[in-house]
Image: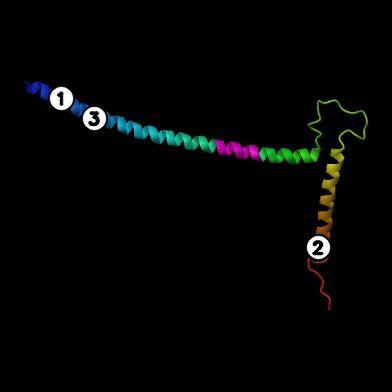
Amino acid sequence: MPSVMHAVTNFVNAIVGIFVQLFNSIFAVFHAIFALGLDVVNSMVTIVQHLVAMVLDLFQGVLGFVTGEFLSSVGRERCVCFLCADVHLPANFIAIGLIVGAYFAYTQYVAKNGGTTKRRA
């Protein structure tokens, strides 16, 4: 026959079990919140890394165009012929010079003519 002490022990064990499970649930909620925050921070860091890499690739492409693969040829054996060594370097600078010269000529033309087109009567 069960005693009163056995019933009280079971009741206390049940109450303690409820509080332990309540603590575990609260701990699990905070753990999930911290894990979500960590994932958000990691995602933002990854996005910033990709943006920085994209900008660096863009500037590396512009620098490569301007220098005409001059920097990538450093350390390789070069031809002694001045015609075949770094042909892209002057060509790219000439292209940039032509673009800048055309823009300068266009702005001077527009400034001289007042920026308007002449109408025929």
Question: In the picture, residue 24 is in which quadrant?
Answer: top left
Q: Which residue is mark 1?
A: 10
Give the overall secondary structure of the magenta segment: helix
**Which contiguous range is marked in magenta?**
46-54
Crowding at mark 3 (Cα within 10 Å: few <14, some 14-19, many 20+): few
Query: Quick one: quadrant of the C terminus?
Result: bottom right
Q: Which residue is mark 2?
A: 110
Question: In the picture, residue 13 is in which quadrant?
Answer: top left
Q: Which is more toward the observer, 8 or 90? A: 8
Q: Secondary structure at mark 2?
A: helix
Q: As shown in the figure, which amino acid type bears the numbered disc 3?
A: Phe
Query: Quick one: quadrant of the N terminus?
Result: top left
Mark 3 vs mark 2: give the one in front.
Answer: 3
* Residue at image location 33% in from the left, 31% down from the top: 27
Q: Secondary structure at mark 3?
A: helix
Crowding at mark 2 (Cα within 10 Å: few <14, some 14-19, many 20+): few
Q: Is residue 91 positioned above or below 28 on the image?
A: below
Residue 40, x across and y down, in percent: 48, 38
Of the numbered discs 2 and 1, the one sitting upstream in the chain is 1
Mark 2 vs mark 1: give the one in front.
Answer: 1
The verdict on residue 50 being magenta is: yes
Q: As shown in the figure, which amino acid type bears the numbered disc 1?
A: Asn
Of the numbered discs 3 and 2, the one sitting upstream in the chain is 3
Q: As shown in the figure, which amino acid type bears the numbered disc 2?
A: Val
- Which label was assigned to residue 97? none
Q: Is residue 79 positioned above or below 118 on the image?
A: above
Q: Are marks 2 and 1 in contact (CB under 8 Å)?
A: no
Q: CA distance from mark 3 to mark 1?
A: 14 Å
- Which label was assigned to residue 19? 3
